[in-house]
Image: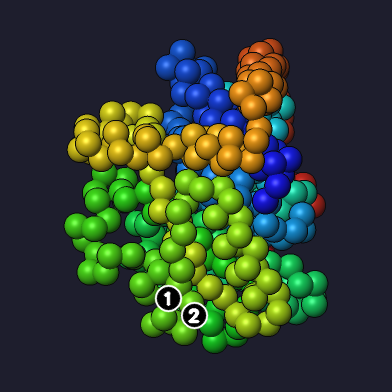
Amino acid sequence: MDAGALLDRYERMNVIRRTEKAAHDLFLRGLVKGTTHLAAGQEAIAVGASAALRPDDYVFATYRGHHHALARGATPEECLAELMSRATGLCRAKGGSMHLTKAATGMLGSYAIVGAHLPMAVGAAWSARLRGTEQLAVAFFGDGATNIGAFHESLNLAAVWKLPVLFVCENNLYMEYTPIADVTAVPRPAADRAPAHGMPGEVVDGNDVVAVEEAVARLARRARAGDGPAVLEAETYRHFGHSRTDPAAYRPAEEVERWLKHDPLDLARGRLAELGVGQETLAEADERARVVVERAVEAAKAAPPPDPSEALTDVWADGGAAWRT
């Protein structure tokens, strides 16, 4: 990857990190409704994967999905307005933090029920196969989802039909508050199980945006060529607790320190320095990201609340909510 492309990835990650920080601060001020599950520290997976995909590919994420929504074309203003229950929000205040969706850019939703979206990604891939579009479906999920039935059912059916779908596990070591290693027999909960379903399972440094992009691009080419699905396990670490009510005191201090030194933004900065990009250029990228998010916060705060008369719209594809059988 050349310096220009990597600088673009760096700036995108920077915007996502700052948007997550803004969500955190707004929550503490009582301006974000409900809870939030921040993905700070996992930006390289969303940005690297999205850069390797086509604009018309499908992405499905978990309730910790702000980074994927932003990587797939949602703006910081749309996301923060949604978290703040504003009319200008991504889902017009009907989704909140855990359901960010922008179908026009292929972001087919964040899902609060663990693993619920994996079968949906399989269905989207089957649809692409039927229509002959060569589109790809990608399901991003946490390590905890590897221990539920939907994970195995989805992998099995995708393999049987050789569908164009990728299963990307964002392994941040914890299934909510429980270390995944404490309750799983294999060391890599996603990649080690892939061969049992007849597909390759790979592991990548999920904090290295270049490594993620290269891995997803390669597996995407394979899937589009008709060689079937694959599992990619991206090793990463969340900077915050499970949700905004979790101080994450269960994590060993030395573990946290070790992972914070392996920050996605720091890794990208190191790569850029090796490519000859100076500190002034990085500072300019940082400033652009700061301005974008700062303006997004102010715009979201100034946006009006949703119109109660629209509460029952958009239940069905025709925009209505009338009961049907």
Q: Position of residue 255 (x, y in %)?
A: 25, 40
Mark 2 and mark 1 lie on one chain; the one further toward the N terminus is 1
Residue marked by disc 1: 194
- Badge number at residue 247: none
Residue 203 seen anywhere in this rendered image of the structure: yes
Instruction: Name the foreground residue: 208 vs 96.
Output: 208
Residue type highlighted by circle 1: Ala
- Mark 2 touching mark 1, by CB under 8 A? yes
Is residue 92 visible in the rendered image? The answer is no
Q: Quadrant of residue 35?
A: top left
Instruction: Rate crowding at label 1 as few (under 14), some (14 to 19) or many (20 or more) other CA atoms within 10 Å.
Output: many
Q: Position of residue 18 (x, y in %)?
A: 56, 25
Q: Residue at x 22, y 33 (%)?
A: 253
Residue assigned mark 2: 199
- Horizontal placement of 117 versus 311: left or right? left
Identified at 46% across, 59% down, the residue is 204
Secondary structure type for disc 1: helix
Q: Residue at x 65, y 35 (%)?
A: 276
Disc 2 residue type? Met
Residue 29 rendering spot, x and y as whole percentages: 46, 13
